[in-house]
């Protein structure tokens, strides 16, 4: 009974680590390697299979019985800090007993990202400096910054309503294009291009596309294809939202 509990705890901890990595934007091969590393540390022979929507790990007990744990993945974000902390734990996995490992994983799991004001400032300046990067001037900098704030609040309330990513990105493309065109008509900027592109860069799925290529290179065709389709859908959603805004504003 004690051994059975140990196996269940190891399997649960390993899968939790995999879930944290996957929901934080890690590649599937990295998630599978992390789970295998944890199981190996506690002398547990396990096989794991990871996709964009689930983490599945099976392990054999001494009597030959197989235990399987499945964790469903509903949302994926970008949190490189969590990935880095898990990576540091895995590098020193031999120093951890199971109880200590569980405590560290729980700390990482419940940690907050950043405070609201910090995120708000980050959205403002990220969008604003993208506008400058693409050749915009100071007024484009300001309009793009306001657009970044719009994206922040839109994403915040859309996530509360549990809207899907396709709709969120379509709405984002629409609102930002409308904002940039209005700023042009009022006379704040000379063209809507710089401020719109600068703000829309916040929604471009760069990490998803990068991970898709890395997964494909590593032979994870299912995960790589899924991420590629996801990136294509997000790009399409932005284009549809921006195109509809241009079409709507052409009548004014």
Image (cartoon, helix red, strand yellow):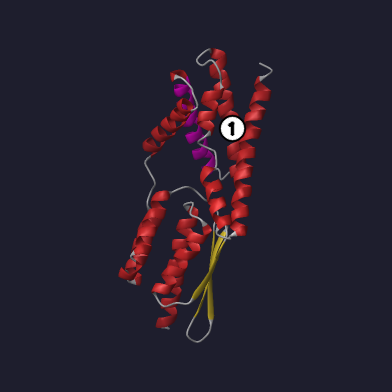
Magenta region, main secondary structure: helix
Query: Residue extending furthest bottom?
Result: 63
Instruction: Give the crowd class for mark 1: few <14, some 14-19, many >=20 residues within 10 Å.
Output: many
Examine the image and state in which quarter residue 98 appears: bottom left
On the image, the x and y values in percent for residue 115 come to: 37, 41
Q: In the visual, does 3 lie left or right of 233?
A: left
For the residue pair 86 and 228, the one nearer the viewer reads as 228
Q: Is residue 36 left or right of residue 91?
A: right
- Classify 244 as above or below 229: above
User: Which quadrant would the N terminus be assigned to in this image?
Assistant: bottom left
| Quadrant of the snapshot with the C terminus | top right
Residue 110 appears in the picture as rendered: no
Position of residue 215 relative to residue 101, above or below, is: above
The residue to which callout 1 is attached is: 173
In the depicted view, which residue is nearer to us: 222 or 244? 222
Residue lying at the far top of the rendered structure: 187
Q: Residue at x 53, y 83 (%)?
A: 65
Residue 248 shown left or right of residue 168 in the figure:
right
- Percent across and percent down for residue 159 are 52, 43
Mark yes or no: residue 59 visible: yes
Residue at coordinates 32% horizontally, 67% vertically from top-left?
100
- Say whether residue 241 is magenta: no
Q: x, y percentage for residue 200?
A: 54, 33
Residue 113: image location, x then y, percent: 39, 46
Magenta-span inclusion, residue 153: yes
Comparing 186 with 5, the one in front is: 186
Helix, strand or loop at mark 1:
helix
Q: Nearer the viewer, residue 132 or 80?
A: 132
* Residue, far left: 95
Highlighted magenta segment, given as a residue range: 140-160
């Amino acid at each position: 009974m004690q051994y059975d509990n140990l196996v269940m705890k190891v399997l649960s901890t390993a899968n939790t680590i995999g879930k944290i990595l996957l929901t934080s934007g890690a590649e599937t091969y990295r998630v599978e390697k992390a789970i295998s590393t944890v199981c190996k540390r506690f002398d547990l022979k396990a096989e794991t299979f990871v996709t964009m929507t689930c983490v599945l790990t099976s392990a054999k007990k001494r009597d030959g019985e197989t235990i399987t744990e499945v964790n469903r993945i509903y949302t994926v974000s970008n949190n490189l800090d969590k990935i880095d902390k898990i990576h540091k734990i895995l590098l020193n996995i031999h120093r951890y007993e199971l109880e200590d490992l569980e405590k560290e994983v729980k700390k990482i799991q419940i940690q907050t990202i950043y405070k609201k004001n910090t995120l708000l400032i980050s959205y403002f300046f990220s969008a604003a400096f993208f506008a400058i990067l693409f050749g915009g001037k100071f007024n484009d900098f300001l309009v793009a910054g306001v657009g970044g704030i719009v994206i922040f609040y839109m994403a915040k309330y859309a996530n509360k309503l549990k809207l899907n990513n396709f709709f969120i990105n379509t709405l984002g493309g629409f609102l930002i294009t409308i904002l940039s065109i209005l700023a042009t008509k009022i006379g704040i900027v000379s063209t809507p291009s710089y401020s719109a592109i600068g703000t829309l860069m916040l929604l471009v799925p760069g990490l998803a596309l990068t991970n898709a290529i890395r997964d494909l290179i590593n032979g994870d065709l299912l995960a790589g294809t899924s991420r590629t389709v996801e990136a294509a859908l997000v790009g399409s959603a932005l284009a549809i939202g921006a195109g509809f805004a241009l079409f709507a504003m052409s009548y004014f």
